[in-house]
């Protein structure tokens, strides 16, 4: 019987690099269309502009539980015609990635459930492997906790609390809130977003109904009301929904969003600023979210209002209000509503779903974002299959990636699966690398034997590429260390030695899965080689497996992916 860890990774290796996405940099609205299709049975000469997105949560979902489940989910989404995912990274006062900022402020760098892992990094690799864009979702925004009296954030910084007119911690629908009008709080949330933008090769950032936001019941902190008096000559009214008081506070949050956008774009102008507020004007009157002004001021690259309704006629009314009263014709490409497909025991029914999707197309709405992923998989994937077969047969390009393939997917170098012990043209071996009983995609070198594998790295477009190797999961056996190095000449099987600058990976202590071993510059058609070297003084065997090239968009923003690479 195959090891579960190896068989899962092997299954992913078989399809790694097959799916690709479409894209456009610099957010130009006059980008030239492309025609690349992957995992599709229908080819469109000019792919439609559509946002086909889905939120991935850490609640009521198992996706983030392991590398394997993340990879399987990304494969499913690519095969189903999606082009973008929004994984949660800020929830219940914790990050879902190792955060130096959170460690500094609270002594906890990541949500305790994910200690020892980096789910965001794992998801970025797997999403980009199949050509999906990934935009981290800061779900909790300016909220601190849910039914926890502010949690560890307000315990550590009580002056960050938002106060209602009675001087109590602002609480609405069970959520407790920071003072989103306070400069120190604003800088903390901004720093969280910038930490992700600077640290990871993501494709954007996303706020929602809690970023930027604060219940209109909040903001009665003395320094806020004093500022209101100084700027307007008015006392803060007891009626928290008094329009002037609401608009003044909403304008502060809009200004914060503009500053956030400017600072995100300073990191990388190709990062999309995505927002998923509640729908306007309800969101302004209840949570100080003036998304109409956001669009008028050009502060967002994509807008996904949460049009959550359990009745399809009510849903259509929300769509009508947004299209008719909030957006201009020029905004329509960048609008894709949030569609509630699953929450608790609720699962959208077929008639509602088809009616809503058809109505989007009737009203000129170009895409949608589903809340949330698990709805696509329930009841034998019926909704995922319906989406794929009825609506997403043709490829699509995101509205702000029109002129290029932004995430072309991984270029994978596999062993030849048909010949015993024989490598493909792209690889060379020295030593007795035999098949493992665990997978066709790996080779095993016995303990005490020296050897190497070399992989030819050739790119179809000039750019900077990250090089990944597929590593065994540590629970699959006892393994030794492999030395990886990129070299300009292919090593000779008769004369090889481990380069001094090689990166050493202990296969017994790593997390398994796709692991980055190098970043290389490649010109179109140029070849370099990745060498995997195993020295003789080892107590345990080592594993060699597939290698993948991923275009690094942060370092290669202007690389044009050739049309010849469309499958």
Image (cartoon, rainbow, N blue to C red):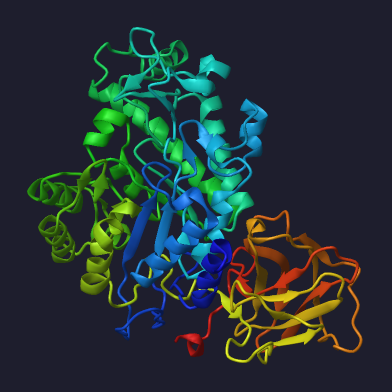
Q: Residue furthest front?
A: 1
How far from the left and from the top, in percent, is residue 360? 18, 61
What residue do we see at 66% from left, 72% from top? 465
What residue do we see at 64% from left, 43% from top? 116
Q: 392 above or below 283? A: below
Frontmost residue, 502 versus 326: 502
Frontmost residue, 463 versus 497: 497
Quadrant where the image shows the C terminus: bottom left
Q: Can residue 159 be seen in this view?
A: yes
Quadrant where the image shows the N terminus: bottom right
How far from the left and from the top, in percent, is residue 434? 71, 81
Q: 424 above or below 21? A: below
Q: Is residue 157 visible?
A: no
Q: In which image quadrant can residue 343 be found?
A: top left
Frontmost residue, 264 versus 466: 466
Q: How many labels does the image show?
A: 0
What residue do we see at 39% from left, 19% from top? 219
How far from the left and from the top, in percent, is residue 122? 56, 56
How far from the left and from the top, in percent, is residue 559? 58, 76
Q: Which residue lies furthest to the top in this view?
A: 166
Q: 145 above or below 423? A: above
Frontmost residue, 515 versus 419: 419
Q: In which image quadrant can residue 538 be found?
A: bottom right
Left or right: residue 296 versus residue 91 is left
Q: 383 above or below 422? A: above
Left or right: residue 420 versus residue 518 is left
What residue do we see at 43% from left, 48% from top? 206
């Amino acid at each position: 019987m195959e090891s579960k860890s190896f068989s899962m990774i092997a299954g992913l290796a078989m399809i790694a690099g097959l799916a690709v996405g479409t894209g456009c940099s610099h957010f130009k609205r006059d980008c030239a269309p492309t025609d690349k299709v992957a995992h599709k049975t229908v080819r469109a000469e000019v792919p439609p502009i559509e946002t086909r997105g889905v939120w991935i949560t850490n609640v009521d979902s198992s996706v983030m539980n392991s590398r394997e489940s993340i990879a399987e989910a990304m494969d499913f989404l690519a095969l189903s015609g999606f082009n973008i995912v929004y994984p949660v990274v800020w929830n219940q006062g914790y990050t879902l990635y190792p955060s130096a900022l959170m460690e500094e402020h609270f002594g906890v760098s990541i949500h305790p459930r994910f200690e020892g892992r980096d789910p965001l990094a794992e998801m970025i690799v797997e999403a980009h492997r199949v050509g999906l864009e990934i935009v981290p979702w800061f779900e909790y925004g300016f909220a601190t906790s849910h039914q926890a009296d502010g949690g560890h954030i307000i315990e550590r910084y009580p002056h960050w609390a938002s106060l209602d007119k009675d001087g109590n911690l602002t609480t609405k629908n069970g959520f407790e809130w920071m003072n989103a009008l306070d400069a120190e709080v604003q800088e903390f949330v901004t720093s969280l977003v910038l930490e992700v933008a600077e640290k990871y090769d993501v494709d954007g950032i996303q706020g929602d109904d809690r970023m930027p936001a604060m219940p209109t019941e909040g903001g009665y902190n003395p320094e806020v009301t004093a500022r209101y008096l100084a700027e307007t000559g008015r006392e803060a009214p007891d009626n928290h929904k008094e329009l002037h008081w609401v608009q003044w506070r909403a304008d502060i949050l809009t200004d914060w969003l503009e500053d956030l956008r400017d600072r995100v774009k300073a990191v990388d102008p190709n990062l999309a600023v995505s927002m998923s507020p509640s729908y306007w004007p309800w969101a302004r009157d209840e949570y100080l979210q003036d998304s109409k002004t956001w669009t008028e001021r050009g502060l967002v690259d994509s807008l996904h209002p949460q049009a959550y309704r359990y009745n399809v006629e009510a849903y259509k009314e929300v769509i009508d209000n947004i299209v008719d009263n909030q957006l201009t014709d020029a905004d329509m490409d960048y609008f894709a509503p949030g569609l509630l497909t699953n929450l608790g025991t609720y699962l959208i029914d077929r008639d509602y779903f088809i009616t809503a999707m058809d109505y989007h197309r009737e009203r000129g709405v170009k895409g949608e974002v589903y809340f949330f992923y698990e709805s696509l998989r329930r009841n034998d994937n019926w909704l995922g299959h319906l989406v794929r077969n009825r609506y997403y047969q043709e490829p699509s390009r995101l509205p702000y990636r029109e002129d290029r393939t932004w995430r072309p997917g991984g270029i994978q170098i596999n062993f030849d699966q048909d010949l015993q012990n024989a490598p493909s043209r792209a690889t060379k071996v020295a030593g007795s690398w035999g098949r493992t009983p665990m997978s066709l995609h790996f080779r095993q070198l016995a303990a005490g034997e020296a050897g190497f594998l070399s992989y030819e790295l050739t790119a179809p477009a000039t750019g900077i590429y990250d090089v990944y190797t597929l590593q065994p999961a540590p629970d699959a056996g006892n393994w030794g260390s492999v030395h990886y190095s990129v070299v300009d000449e292919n090593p000779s099987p008769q004369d090889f030695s481990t380069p001094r600058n090689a990166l050493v990976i202990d296969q017994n202590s790593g997390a398994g899965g796709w692991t980055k071993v190098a970043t290389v510059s490649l010109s179109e058609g140029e070849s370099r080689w990745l060498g995997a070297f195993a020295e003789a003084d080892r107590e345990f065997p080592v594993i060699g497996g597939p290698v993948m090239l991923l275009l690094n968009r942060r370092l290669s923003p202007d690389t044009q992916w050739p049309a010849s690479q469309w499958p």
